[in-house]
Image (cartoon, helix red, strand yellow):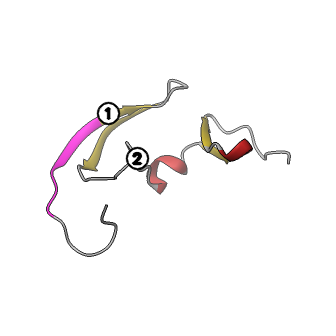
Amino acid sequence: MVFGGEQKVGVYDVAIALPNGKLFHEMEVYGADLGEYSILFGMDIITETDFLITNADGKTTFQFRTPSEGGVEL
């Protein structure tokens, strides 16, 4: 997996649908080897949602919520 330096990758225009139904049209994405990961979300998507990451019992999960419902109670 390479996150620094240079690497030749394919560039694609895609639509991305989040599990909650939010759809992002004409997103420019780059194909790369992410090792064990399938996708890497950027701030262009994260800032359009409420984005929550948890690590309960050593299992990392994430959730997108849109439209925003405001703060998260801890």
Question: Is residue 59 shown left or right of residue 72?
Answer: left
Residue reaching furthest to the right: 74
Residue 7 sits in which quadrant?
A: bottom left
| Image point (61%, 40%), residue name | 61
Figure check: 53 above or below 17: below
| Image point (41%, 50%), residue name | 40
In the rendered structure, does residue 50 fall within the stretch colored magenta? no
Q: Whole-percent x and y of residue 51?
A: 62, 45
Q: Whole-percent x and y of residue 73?
A: 85, 45
Q: Whole-percent x and y of residue 11?
A: 18, 50
User: Disc 1 designates what residue?
Assistant: 15
Residue nearest the viewer, comparing 32 with 36: 36
Q: Whole-percent x and y of residue 63?
A: 61, 37
CB within 8 Å, label 2 to label 1? no
Tell me the CA gap for discs 2 and 1: 19 Å
- Mark 1 residue crowding within 10 angstroms, few (<14) / some (14–19) / many (20+): few
User: Disc 2 designates what residue?
Assistant: 37
In the rendered structure, does residue 9 fall within the stretch colored magenta? yes
- Mark 2 residue crowding within 10 angstroms, few (<14) / some (14–19) / many (20+): few
Residues drawn in magenta: 8-14
Q: Name the amino acid, label 1.
A: Ala
| Image point (27%, 48%), residue name | 28
Q: Name the amino acid, label 2.
A: Tyr
